Image (tube, rainbow, N blue to C red):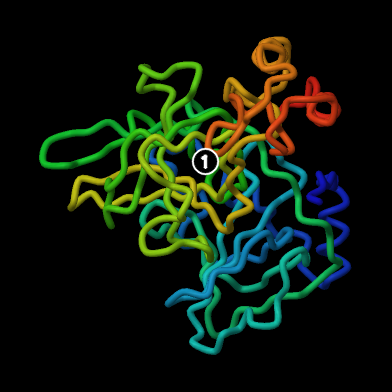
Amino acid sequence: MKKTITISIAAMVLLGMANGLPADSLSIYDIQYTTNADGTSLHVNEVVDCFGGIVIHKYAGYSPKLTLYDPAHPDGWGGLTVKDFTGTDAFSGVNVGEWLSFTNTIVEESRGNTQLAYESGSGFVVGDSYPTPDAISVTCADIAAPVEGPADEWHVIDHSAEMYEAMYLRVEKITVTRIGLGKASDNYVLQSFEYPSDPNWSCWAADYMNVDAIGDYHPYVELGSRFCAVEGILEQYTNPDKGWDYYQLLTTTTDDFTVGQTADFDDDCDVDLLDFGLFAAHWLEGGCKDPNWCGGADLNQNTYVDPPDLEKFSENWLVNDK
């Protein structure tokens, strides 16, 4: 089970000093926070030491990379990518949940993403281990989808989502409404249940970092798929020459998808009086069978809607998937 970890900025400084980092080392917040309209770090091209954060993801692509979380800043500017350019698989022994601090790394922008370049001469120190933090709940409006331009160009209206870059996020009650978009034609649109026609309440996702994906997409992802929640790491992709500038929520495993819950008959991701009304309409009904199972009210699929089903319904009463 994931946990929310609270560590004060002062504690982070003490942790860094205990690991032998200079007092002028930067936090993830220091590196990621910016007032630049395009999201570029205020420390770009500087060589820095970093107090670091909790490793929340490892990606073993062409250039292996880590995603770090700064628990002192859960509301934004708390995520950062560190990419290994040494060619030695320097992070092979690093585990998710460990606190890593870094020395002699370069702050750079890669396709819009602020990251630390770990090169020959860079170093890191492994600290304590922590439970994997919870994903941070946002709306699709907070990480809004880009607007389509000419010739399949896609641009965000602004970079207000920059504060969530490299953070582990959760969007709720969404539907897949488009697929086959973006640089690799592997992006898909998640649209809010509550605002199904409002483009301001849609965001983009992709599964290229998902270990359970098959081809471009995870098997759960199809046009019309409804999810109570989707979680992932927010990444920016910018390529002005191609006309692309967008944010994408990158899922990592099957666990990042919450498809639904028991007794939620109206697919609104909670169990309430509306669901009880639908359940009661089938009370003591028999002859239930696949695929409908009496409107889903035959929860134990024994062909009857009877007291065991009511007990199962009661176990989920007023449960929502938040």
Residue 71 lies left or right of residue 288; in this view the side is right
Q: What residue did someone put label 1 on?
A: 34
What residue is at 53 percent from the left and 66 percent from the top? 211
What residue is at 55 percent from the left and 39 percent from the top? 290
- The outermost residue toward the bottom is 88
Q: Quadrant of the C terminus?
A: top right
Residue 175 found in image quarter: top left
- The outermost residue toward the front is 287
Height in image: 13 above or below 310?
Answer: below
Compare residues 320 and 85 and report the one nearer the observer. 320
Compare residues 210 and 142 and report the one nearer the observer. 210
What residue is at 18 percent from the left and 51 percent from the top? 242
Compare residues 156 and 50 and report the one nearer the observer. 156
Residue 321 shows in this picture? no
State the count of labels. 1
What residue is at 73 percent from the left and 67 percent from the top? 101
- Which amino acid lies under the numbered mark 1 shown in the image of this protein? Thr
> Mark 1 Cα within 10 Å, few/some/many (few <14, many 20+)?
some
Q: Position of residue 87 (x, y in %)?
A: 49, 87
Residue 182 lies left or right of residue 306; in this view the side is left
Q: Position of residue 206 (x, y in %)?
A: 42, 51
